[in-house]
Image: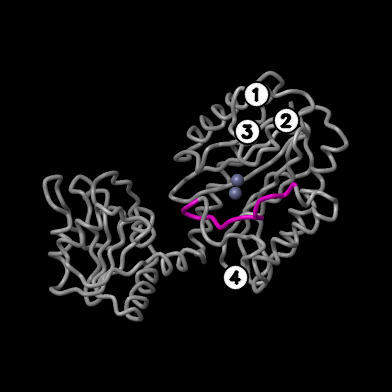
Amino acid sequence: MDQSRLQKLRTYMEEQQLDAVLVTLPKHVYYLTGFLSEPHERFLGLLIPRDGEATLVVPALDLEAAEKSSAVKKIATHKDTDNPYEIVKGILPENVKRVGLEKDHLTVNRYEALAAVLGAELYVDMELPLREMRLIKTAEEVVRIKHAIALVEKVLAEGLKKVKAGVTEAEMVAELEYLMKRFGANGPSFDTMVLAGENSALPHGHPGERVIREGDLLLFDMGVVADGYVSDITRTFAVGEISEKQKEIYNTVLAANLAAIEATRPGMTLASLDKVARDVITEKGYGEYFMHRLGHGMGMDIHEYPSIHGANQDTVRAGMVFTIEPGIYLPGVGGVRIEDDVFVTENGCEVLTSFPKELTVIG
Ligand code: ZN
Ligand code: ZN
Protein backbone atom coordinates (compact mmCIF):
# COMPACT_ATOMS: atom_id res chain seq x y z
CA MET A 1 0.00 0.00 0.00
CA ASP A 2 1.06 3.49 -0.86
CA GLN A 3 2.26 5.13 2.36
CA SER A 4 2.41 8.50 0.63
CA ARG A 5 -1.39 8.67 0.83
CA LEU A 6 -1.34 8.84 4.61
CA GLN A 7 1.48 11.33 4.35
CA LYS A 8 -0.60 13.58 2.10
CA LEU A 9 -3.42 13.43 4.58
CA ARG A 10 -1.05 14.42 7.36
CA THR A 11 0.12 17.40 5.33
CA TYR A 12 -3.50 18.49 4.96
CA MET A 13 -4.03 18.03 8.72
CA GLU A 14 -1.03 20.28 9.36
CA GLU A 15 -2.40 22.96 7.03
CA GLN A 16 -5.85 22.84 8.56
CA GLN A 17 -4.56 22.43 12.11
CA LEU A 18 -6.58 19.27 12.63
CA ASP A 19 -5.85 17.32 15.81
CA ALA A 20 -7.21 14.11 14.37
CA VAL A 21 -8.97 12.62 11.37
CA LEU A 22 -11.43 9.76 11.50
CA VAL A 23 -12.00 8.04 8.15
CA THR A 24 -15.00 5.69 8.10
CA LEU A 25 -16.05 5.28 4.47
CA PRO A 26 -14.97 1.68 3.73
CA LYS A 27 -13.52 2.68 0.36
CA HIS A 28 -11.40 5.35 1.97
CA VAL A 29 -10.23 2.96 4.66
CA TYR A 30 -9.23 0.63 1.83
CA TYR A 31 -7.54 3.45 -0.08
CA LEU A 32 -5.45 4.43 2.94
CA THR A 33 -4.70 1.01 4.47
CA GLY A 34 -5.25 -1.70 1.85
CA PHE A 35 -7.88 -3.34 4.05
CA LEU A 36 -11.10 -3.85 2.07
CA SER A 37 -14.16 -4.56 4.17
CA GLU A 38 -17.88 -3.84 4.26
CA PRO A 39 -18.67 -3.75 7.99
CA HIS A 40 -22.42 -3.08 7.50
CA GLU A 41 -23.82 -1.70 10.76
CA ARG A 42 -20.59 -2.31 12.68
CA PHE A 43 -17.98 0.39 13.16
CA LEU A 44 -14.89 0.50 10.95
CA GLY A 45 -12.57 3.46 11.08
CA LEU A 46 -9.07 4.68 10.48
CA LEU A 47 -8.03 7.11 13.17
CA ILE A 48 -5.14 9.44 12.47
CA PRO A 49 -3.99 11.59 15.37
CA ARG A 50 -1.83 14.53 14.28
CA ASP A 51 1.04 13.57 16.56
CA GLY A 52 0.75 9.83 16.65
CA GLU A 53 0.56 6.58 14.84
CA ALA A 54 -2.54 5.85 12.74
CA THR A 55 -4.82 3.16 14.18
CA LEU A 56 -7.26 0.98 12.33
CA VAL A 57 -10.34 0.22 14.44
CA VAL A 58 -12.18 -2.90 13.28
CA PRO A 59 -14.88 -5.24 14.58
CA ALA A 60 -13.20 -8.05 16.56
CA LEU A 61 -14.34 -10.62 14.04
CA ASP A 62 -12.36 -8.83 11.28
CA LEU A 63 -9.05 -8.71 13.15
CA GLU A 64 -7.41 -11.55 11.28
CA ALA A 65 -8.42 -10.23 7.85
CA ALA A 66 -7.24 -6.74 8.79
CA GLU A 67 -3.87 -7.99 10.03
CA LYS A 68 -3.35 -9.73 6.73
CA SER A 69 -4.02 -6.84 4.40
CA SER A 70 -3.66 -3.56 6.29
CA ALA A 71 -0.52 -1.52 5.85
CA VAL A 72 -1.47 0.29 9.07
CA LYS A 73 -0.18 -2.18 11.60
CA LYS A 74 -1.64 -0.71 14.75
CA ILE A 75 -5.09 -2.26 14.99
CA ALA A 76 -7.70 -1.91 17.74
CA THR A 77 -10.85 -4.01 17.92
CA HIS A 78 -14.31 -3.60 19.34
CA LYS A 79 -16.90 -6.19 20.23
CA ASP A 80 -20.61 -5.80 19.55
CA THR A 81 -21.15 -4.91 23.22
CA ASP A 82 -18.57 -2.06 23.14
CA ASN A 83 -19.17 1.56 22.28
CA PRO A 84 -16.63 1.94 19.45
CA TYR A 85 -16.47 5.71 19.99
CA GLU A 86 -15.13 5.15 23.51
CA ILE A 87 -12.35 3.13 21.91
CA VAL A 88 -11.70 5.96 19.46
CA LYS A 89 -11.51 8.45 22.32
CA GLY A 90 -9.16 6.16 24.23
CA ILE A 91 -6.69 6.21 21.36
CA LEU A 92 -6.65 9.99 21.03
CA PRO A 93 -4.86 12.42 23.31
CA GLU A 94 -6.99 14.50 25.70
CA ASN A 95 -8.69 17.65 24.43
CA VAL A 96 -8.77 17.21 20.70
CA LYS A 97 -10.35 20.36 19.31
CA ARG A 98 -10.47 20.06 15.52
CA VAL A 99 -11.43 16.72 14.00
CA GLY A 100 -11.74 15.81 10.31
CA LEU A 101 -14.69 13.63 9.22
CA GLU A 102 -16.43 12.55 6.03
CA LYS A 103 -19.62 14.54 6.48
CA ASP A 104 -21.25 13.06 3.39
CA HIS A 105 -20.84 9.58 4.73
CA LEU A 106 -21.34 9.82 8.48
CA THR A 107 -25.00 9.51 9.49
CA VAL A 108 -26.42 11.98 12.00
CA ASN A 109 -26.75 9.10 14.49
CA ARG A 110 -23.10 8.19 14.22
CA TYR A 111 -21.98 11.78 14.32
CA GLU A 112 -23.98 12.40 17.49
CA ALA A 113 -22.62 9.25 19.12
CA LEU A 114 -19.06 10.31 18.27
CA ALA A 115 -19.51 13.94 19.25
CA ALA A 116 -21.08 12.98 22.60
CA VAL A 117 -17.97 11.01 23.54
CA LEU A 118 -15.29 13.13 21.90
CA GLY A 119 -16.60 16.62 22.63
CA ALA A 120 -14.38 18.35 20.03
CA GLU A 121 -14.99 22.01 19.18
CA LEU A 122 -15.05 21.72 15.42
CA TYR A 123 -15.67 18.97 12.90
CA VAL A 124 -14.16 19.62 9.48
CA ASP A 125 -15.26 17.89 6.27
CA MET A 126 -12.58 15.73 4.63
CA GLU A 127 -14.46 15.30 1.33
CA LEU A 128 -12.28 17.68 -0.66
CA PRO A 129 -8.79 16.42 0.25
CA LEU A 130 -9.86 12.80 -0.16
CA ARG A 131 -11.48 13.50 -3.52
CA GLU A 132 -8.39 15.38 -4.63
CA MET A 133 -6.17 12.44 -3.68
CA ARG A 134 -8.35 9.94 -5.51
CA LEU A 135 -8.47 12.11 -8.63
CA ILE A 136 -4.95 11.24 -9.76
CA LYS A 137 -4.53 7.51 -10.12
CA THR A 138 -1.36 5.62 -9.29
CA ALA A 139 0.07 2.99 -11.61
CA GLU A 140 -1.23 0.32 -9.24
CA GLU A 141 -4.76 1.69 -9.43
CA VAL A 142 -4.62 1.78 -13.23
CA VAL A 143 -3.61 -1.89 -13.22
CA ARG A 144 -6.70 -2.70 -11.18
CA ILE A 145 -8.96 -0.66 -13.43
CA LYS A 146 -7.49 -2.45 -16.46
CA HIS A 147 -8.24 -5.76 -14.82
CA ALA A 148 -11.88 -4.75 -14.23
CA ILE A 149 -12.07 -3.65 -17.88
CA ALA A 150 -10.58 -6.92 -19.15
CA LEU A 151 -13.22 -8.81 -17.19
CA VAL A 152 -16.17 -6.82 -18.48
CA GLU A 153 -14.93 -7.03 -22.07
CA LYS A 154 -14.69 -10.80 -21.73
CA VAL A 155 -18.25 -10.84 -20.37
CA LEU A 156 -19.50 -8.71 -23.26
CA ALA A 157 -17.79 -10.91 -25.87
CA GLU A 158 -19.25 -14.05 -24.33
CA GLY A 159 -22.67 -12.51 -23.69
CA LEU A 160 -23.06 -11.39 -27.30
CA LYS A 161 -23.18 -15.04 -28.34
CA LYS A 162 -26.53 -15.30 -26.57
CA VAL A 163 -28.16 -12.47 -28.49
CA LYS A 164 -30.85 -13.56 -30.89
CA ALA A 165 -34.29 -12.42 -31.90
CA GLY A 166 -36.81 -13.37 -29.23
CA VAL A 167 -34.52 -13.02 -26.19
CA THR A 168 -35.60 -10.27 -23.77
CA GLU A 169 -33.47 -7.45 -22.40
CA ALA A 170 -33.93 -8.83 -18.87
CA GLU A 171 -32.72 -12.29 -19.93
CA MET A 172 -29.59 -10.74 -21.42
CA VAL A 173 -28.94 -8.83 -18.18
CA ALA A 174 -29.24 -12.05 -16.16
CA GLU A 175 -26.84 -13.80 -18.52
CA LEU A 176 -24.27 -11.00 -18.36
CA GLU A 177 -24.36 -10.71 -14.58
CA TYR A 178 -23.95 -14.47 -14.29
CA LEU A 179 -20.89 -14.29 -16.53
CA MET A 180 -19.41 -11.45 -14.45
CA LYS A 181 -19.32 -13.64 -11.37
CA ARG A 182 -18.23 -16.70 -13.31
CA PHE A 183 -15.26 -14.81 -14.74
CA GLY A 184 -14.18 -13.68 -11.29
CA ALA A 185 -15.63 -10.22 -10.76
CA ASN A 186 -17.19 -9.33 -7.40
CA GLY A 187 -20.27 -8.23 -9.33
CA PRO A 188 -21.61 -5.45 -11.53
CA SER A 189 -20.38 -1.93 -10.75
CA PHE A 190 -23.90 -0.59 -11.46
CA ASP A 191 -27.18 -2.00 -12.81
CA THR A 192 -26.37 -3.68 -16.12
CA MET A 193 -28.17 -2.03 -19.03
CA VAL A 194 -29.38 -3.88 -22.09
CA LEU A 195 -31.79 -1.73 -24.09
CA ALA A 196 -33.31 -2.72 -27.41
CA GLY A 197 -34.92 -0.73 -30.20
CA GLU A 198 -36.95 2.27 -29.03
CA ASN A 199 -35.79 1.60 -25.44
CA SER A 200 -32.19 2.33 -26.44
CA ALA A 201 -33.33 5.92 -26.97
CA LEU A 202 -33.86 6.27 -23.21
CA PRO A 203 -30.44 7.06 -21.69
CA HIS A 204 -31.69 5.84 -18.31
CA GLY A 205 -34.05 3.09 -19.42
CA HIS A 206 -34.83 -0.07 -17.46
CA PRO A 207 -34.21 -3.43 -19.10
CA GLY A 208 -37.40 -5.44 -19.11
CA GLU A 209 -39.57 -7.75 -21.15
CA ARG A 210 -38.85 -6.04 -24.48
CA VAL A 211 -37.87 -8.78 -26.91
CA ILE A 212 -34.83 -8.24 -29.15
CA ARG A 213 -35.89 -7.98 -32.78
CA GLU A 214 -34.33 -7.76 -36.22
CA GLY A 215 -33.63 -4.12 -37.08
CA ASP A 216 -32.99 -3.03 -33.46
CA LEU A 217 -30.15 -0.99 -32.17
CA LEU A 218 -29.07 -2.90 -29.07
CA LEU A 219 -27.25 -0.96 -26.36
CA PHE A 220 -25.14 -2.54 -23.61
CA ASP A 221 -23.86 -0.38 -20.75
CA MET A 222 -22.10 -2.37 -18.08
CA GLY A 223 -19.15 -2.68 -15.76
CA VAL A 224 -17.76 -4.84 -12.99
CA VAL A 225 -16.12 -4.36 -9.62
CA ALA A 226 -12.96 -6.38 -9.05
CA ASP A 227 -10.34 -5.82 -6.35
CA GLY A 228 -12.10 -2.65 -5.26
CA TYR A 229 -11.95 -0.96 -8.69
CA VAL A 230 -14.54 -0.60 -11.43
CA SER A 231 -14.95 -0.65 -15.19
CA ASP A 232 -17.63 1.00 -17.32
CA ILE A 233 -18.20 0.38 -21.02
CA THR A 234 -21.02 0.98 -23.50
CA ARG A 235 -21.29 -0.58 -26.93
CA THR A 236 -24.23 -0.46 -29.32
CA PHE A 237 -24.84 -3.12 -31.95
CA ALA A 238 -27.11 -3.65 -34.94
CA VAL A 239 -29.40 -6.65 -34.74
CA GLY A 240 -29.56 -7.81 -38.35
CA GLU A 241 -30.22 -5.19 -40.99
CA ILE A 242 -30.69 -1.61 -39.70
CA SER A 243 -31.83 1.57 -41.46
CA GLU A 244 -29.64 4.28 -43.02
CA LYS A 245 -30.81 6.66 -40.28
CA GLN A 246 -29.64 4.24 -37.57
CA LYS A 247 -26.30 3.83 -39.33
CA GLU A 248 -25.93 7.57 -39.58
CA ILE A 249 -26.43 8.16 -35.87
CA TYR A 250 -24.07 5.30 -35.10
CA ASN A 251 -21.28 6.72 -37.21
CA THR A 252 -21.86 10.23 -35.84
CA VAL A 253 -21.50 9.01 -32.26
CA LEU A 254 -18.40 7.03 -33.20
CA ALA A 255 -16.86 10.13 -34.82
CA ALA A 256 -17.62 12.15 -31.65
CA ASN A 257 -16.09 9.46 -29.44
CA LEU A 258 -12.93 9.30 -31.55
CA ALA A 259 -12.62 13.10 -31.77
CA ALA A 260 -12.82 13.46 -27.98
CA ILE A 261 -10.24 10.72 -27.41
CA GLU A 262 -7.94 12.34 -29.95
CA ALA A 263 -8.34 15.75 -28.28
CA THR A 264 -7.82 14.64 -24.67
CA ARG A 265 -4.69 16.10 -23.13
CA PRO A 266 -3.63 17.72 -19.88
CA GLY A 267 -4.25 21.44 -19.58
CA MET A 268 -7.46 21.71 -21.61
CA THR A 269 -10.65 22.44 -19.71
CA LEU A 270 -13.17 19.68 -19.15
CA ALA A 271 -15.76 21.97 -20.77
CA SER A 272 -13.71 22.21 -23.95
CA LEU A 273 -13.33 18.43 -24.08
CA ASP A 274 -17.09 18.04 -23.81
CA LYS A 275 -17.43 20.58 -26.63
CA VAL A 276 -15.18 18.60 -28.99
CA ALA A 277 -17.59 15.66 -28.97
CA ARG A 278 -20.71 17.82 -28.86
CA ASP A 279 -19.62 19.84 -31.90
CA VAL A 280 -19.31 16.68 -34.02
CA ILE A 281 -22.85 15.67 -33.10
CA THR A 282 -24.28 19.19 -33.46
CA GLU A 283 -22.76 19.60 -36.92
CA LYS A 284 -24.71 16.57 -38.05
CA GLY A 285 -27.91 18.10 -36.70
CA TYR A 286 -28.30 15.88 -33.63
CA GLY A 287 -27.12 18.26 -30.91
CA GLU A 288 -30.45 18.28 -29.08
CA TYR A 289 -30.42 14.47 -28.91
CA PHE A 290 -27.13 14.34 -26.96
CA MET A 291 -28.61 15.45 -23.66
CA HIS A 292 -26.07 14.27 -21.09
CA ARG A 293 -22.50 15.08 -20.11
CA LEU A 294 -19.60 13.61 -22.06
CA GLY A 295 -18.25 11.52 -19.21
CA HIS A 296 -17.27 11.05 -15.59
CA GLY A 297 -14.29 10.04 -13.51
CA MET A 298 -14.10 6.47 -12.24
CA GLY A 299 -11.91 4.38 -9.99
CA MET A 300 -13.13 2.91 -6.71
CA ASP A 301 -16.55 4.38 -7.55
CA ILE A 302 -18.37 4.28 -10.83
CA HIS A 303 -19.01 8.03 -10.69
CA GLU A 304 -16.10 10.02 -9.34
CA TYR A 305 -14.75 13.45 -9.93
CA PRO A 306 -14.30 14.95 -12.56
CA SER A 307 -17.61 15.51 -14.28
CA ILE A 308 -17.03 16.29 -17.95
CA HIS A 309 -19.66 18.79 -18.99
CA GLY A 310 -19.94 22.15 -20.65
CA ALA A 311 -19.75 24.23 -17.47
CA ASN A 312 -16.76 22.57 -15.79
CA GLN A 313 -13.80 24.92 -16.17
CA ASP A 314 -11.41 22.64 -14.24
CA THR A 315 -8.62 21.23 -16.36
CA VAL A 316 -7.79 17.75 -17.54
CA ARG A 317 -4.81 16.44 -15.56
CA ALA A 318 -2.37 13.62 -16.20
CA GLY A 319 -3.33 10.63 -14.06
CA MET A 320 -7.08 11.12 -14.29
CA VAL A 321 -9.20 8.18 -15.41
CA PHE A 322 -12.57 9.04 -16.91
CA THR A 323 -15.14 7.87 -19.43
CA ILE A 324 -15.84 9.36 -22.84
CA GLU A 325 -19.40 8.44 -23.73
CA PRO A 326 -21.20 10.54 -26.31
CA GLY A 327 -24.65 9.42 -27.43
CA ILE A 328 -27.58 10.25 -29.68
CA TYR A 329 -31.08 9.23 -28.60
CA LEU A 330 -33.76 9.55 -31.27
CA PRO A 331 -37.25 8.89 -29.91
CA GLY A 332 -38.89 6.04 -31.78
CA VAL A 333 -35.76 5.28 -33.81
CA GLY A 334 -33.32 4.19 -31.13
CA GLY A 335 -30.20 5.32 -29.36
CA VAL A 336 -26.48 4.89 -29.73
CA ARG A 337 -23.86 5.43 -27.05
CA ILE A 338 -20.20 4.44 -27.30
CA GLU A 339 -18.31 4.63 -24.03
CA ASP A 340 -14.61 4.15 -23.44
CA ASP A 341 -12.47 4.52 -20.31
CA VAL A 342 -9.33 6.61 -20.75
CA PHE A 343 -6.24 7.30 -18.65
CA VAL A 344 -4.76 10.75 -19.17
CA THR A 345 -1.01 10.72 -19.88
CA GLU A 346 1.51 13.58 -20.12
CA ASN A 347 0.66 14.33 -23.75
CA GLY A 348 -2.64 12.65 -24.52
CA CYS A 349 -4.52 9.66 -23.24
CA GLU A 350 -4.36 5.90 -23.22
CA VAL A 351 -7.65 4.23 -24.12
CA LEU A 352 -8.08 1.44 -21.57
CA THR A 353 -11.12 -0.19 -23.16
CA SER A 354 -10.35 -2.17 -26.30
CA PHE A 355 -13.64 -3.70 -27.43
CA PRO A 356 -14.12 -2.98 -31.19
CA LYS A 357 -16.24 0.05 -32.05
CA GLU A 358 -16.98 -0.23 -35.77
CA LEU A 359 -20.66 -0.86 -36.42
CA THR A 360 -21.15 -4.59 -35.85
CA VAL A 361 -24.13 -6.70 -36.81
CA ILE A 362 -25.08 -9.41 -34.34
CA GLY A 363 -27.90 -11.89 -33.81
ZN1 ZN B 1 -21.53 3.24 -18.66
ZN1 ZN C 1 -20.33 5.89 -17.66
Disc 3 and disc 4 in contact, CB within 8 angstroms: no
- Indicate if the residue with disc 4 has its beta carbon within 8 Å of ligand 2: no
Which residue position holds label 1?
210
SS of the residue at dot 4?
Answer: loop
The answer for how far apart the CA atoms under marks 1 and 2 are is 9 Å
Which one is earlier in the sequence, the residue at label 1 or at label 4? 1
Image quadrant where residue 216 sits:
top right
Amino acid type of the residue tagged 3 in the rendering: Val
Instruction: Answer with mark 3 or mark 4, whichever residue precedes in sequence.
Output: 3
Frontmost of labels 2 and 3 is 2
Q: Are marks 1 and 4 in contact (CB under 8 Å)?
A: no
Residue type at the position of mark 2: Gly
Q: Residue at x 85, y 51 (%)?
A: 284
Dot 1 beta carbon under 8 Å from ligand 1: no
Q: Are marks 2 and 4 in contact (CB under 8 Å)?
A: no
> Which residue lies under the disc numbered 3?
194
Q: Which residue is mark 4?
A: 314
- Looking at the image, residue 41 sits to the left or right of residue 201; the answer is left
Q: Are marks 1 and 2 in contact (CB under 8 Å)?
A: yes
Q: Residue 272's spot in the image, x, y percent?
A: 70, 67
Residue 299 on the magenta span? yes
**Structural crowding at the residue carrying mark 4, measured as other residues with C-alpha within 10 Å and reported as few (<14), some (14–19) or many (≥20):** some
Residue 296: x, y in percent? Answer: 58, 56
Q: Main secondary structure of the magenta part?
A: loop
Q: Disc 1 to disc 3, how far (Cα)?
A: 10 Å
45 over 100 or under it: above or below: above
Magenta stretch bounds: 289-301
Question: Crowdedness of circle 2 by 10 Å Cα count: few (<14), some, many (20+)?
Answer: many
Taking depth in this image into account, of 201 and 241 the one nearest to the observer is 201
